[in-house]
Amino acid sequence: MNFGLSHTSTSLISVNKGERKTISPKNVVHLYDLAGITPLAGIQDYTEGIYDGDPSTPYDTAQTNQHNYLLDELGAGEGFRLLEVGCGLGTLLETAKERGVIGTGITISEDQVSKCKAKGLKVHLLNYKDLPDEFDKSFDGIIANGSLEHFCQPEEAMAGKQNSIYKHMFKIFAGVLDSDSDSQRVVTTAIHFRGEHIDPRKLLRNPFLQIFDPENFHFSILHRGYGGYYPIRGQLEACASGEFTLVKEVEATEDYRFSADHWREKLKKAILTNVRFIGETLRQLVKRPIHTSWVITSHVGPESWPWQFRGDNPPAMLYRHTWQRNSCRLPGNGVMQQCWSRGKEAIQIASP
Ligand SMILES: C[S@@+](CC[C@H](N)C(=O)[O-])C[C@H]1O[C@@H](n2cnc3c(N)ncnc32)[C@H](O)[C@@H]1O
């Protein structure tokens, strides 16, 4: 599937029979191969859970709440064809399977693919930019739970490409939705910069040369470990507008703060007491010392990961977005058809 934006971000290589394949950013690929050791610390999910304001909610319950919320937003039940873009270790796909959903996941981490396959899940090693033709019009709904933060890199933001990357993403998402489906929804969760964008050049500068500016210091550590540049509020909506209408926005930064605190506690405990986890961490430090050190730094030490969600005005915000495909709009009658027919919600958007 090619929508003519093949040179926007990462470089491309030719593979078999003239097919082209996107090279995913190295630090993102390393991150999720490294993250393969976190199940040893009791962490299977790499996005926030839903705590309903109660930080004592057990970690696993919060994560299951999140899976159920996302699936409910799509109206995903028996026989629903779901594509999860950035499926991690496949925990959402497992919850989906329990509902009778037919789930397909993609990830750019080989380690995640093999762990998901070992769980009996259908998961492919694929960048979302390289979805094969057989995915065209093949899904009822899409979930991207914490993956789109990686889709734009600071270098691309510097080159003014962030909007075109998101527009391209929504176009790809629209292309794989079945126009006869009665859902045609996408749900995304994504960390956003609060207010304005941070200057992308600051993320590329050495954190220790900007240690007296907390925003630049922490965001440059985060980029080194995680690889990505966030959108700001409203940016995704503007980029989606040709293909999708935003039907729901939930601000859930507190949920990410509670999740990040849980991760920090679990990782600290494991690094002090869990011999296998210590051994695996040392092995990763030997394999990729610099990258692994940045990831560790972002959870313990300066704690850049939880830092971004702390305080009355946190530097980053988490939004959950539900998108309805525009093709549901009925020509001529001025209202959006209720494509999403499985739930309680009626979508009535008056046209100008
Ligand atoms: C923060 S993790 C979230 C994983 C999972 N959704 C969860 O909640 O645990 C981000 C996921 O996005 C995937 N990812 C990042 N960039 C991607 C891309 N360009 N195409 C497909 N997947 C990507 C990563 O491999 C990883 O599985």
Image (spheres, rainbow, N blue to C red):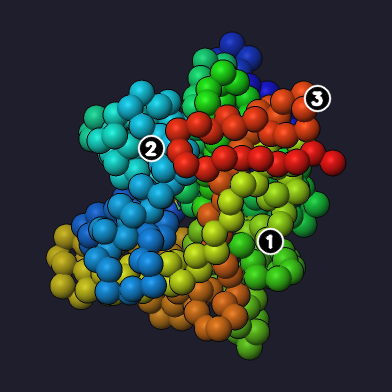
Amino acid on which disc 1 is placed: Ile
Distance between the Cα atoms at labels 1 and 3?
Answer: 34 Å
Q: Residues within 10 Å of mark 2 (few under 14, many from 20)?
A: some
Foreground mark, 1 or 3, reads: 3
- Please name the residue shown 68% across and 61% down the image: 233
Q: Residue furthest right?
A: 352
Q: In the shown orientation, is residue 301 left or right of residue 139?
A: left
Residue 215, placed above or below residue 143: below
Q: Secondary structure at mark 1?
A: loop
Q: Is residue 77 visible?
A: yes
First of labels 1, 3 by sequence position: 1
The residue under label 1 is 232
Residue 169 image point, x, y percent: 65, 38
As drawn, the label of residue 332 is: 3
Residue 106: give x, y in percent of width and height: 45, 34
Tell me the SS state at disc 2.
helix
Q: Quadrant of residue 315?
A: bottom right
Percent across and percent down for residue 320 are 53, 55
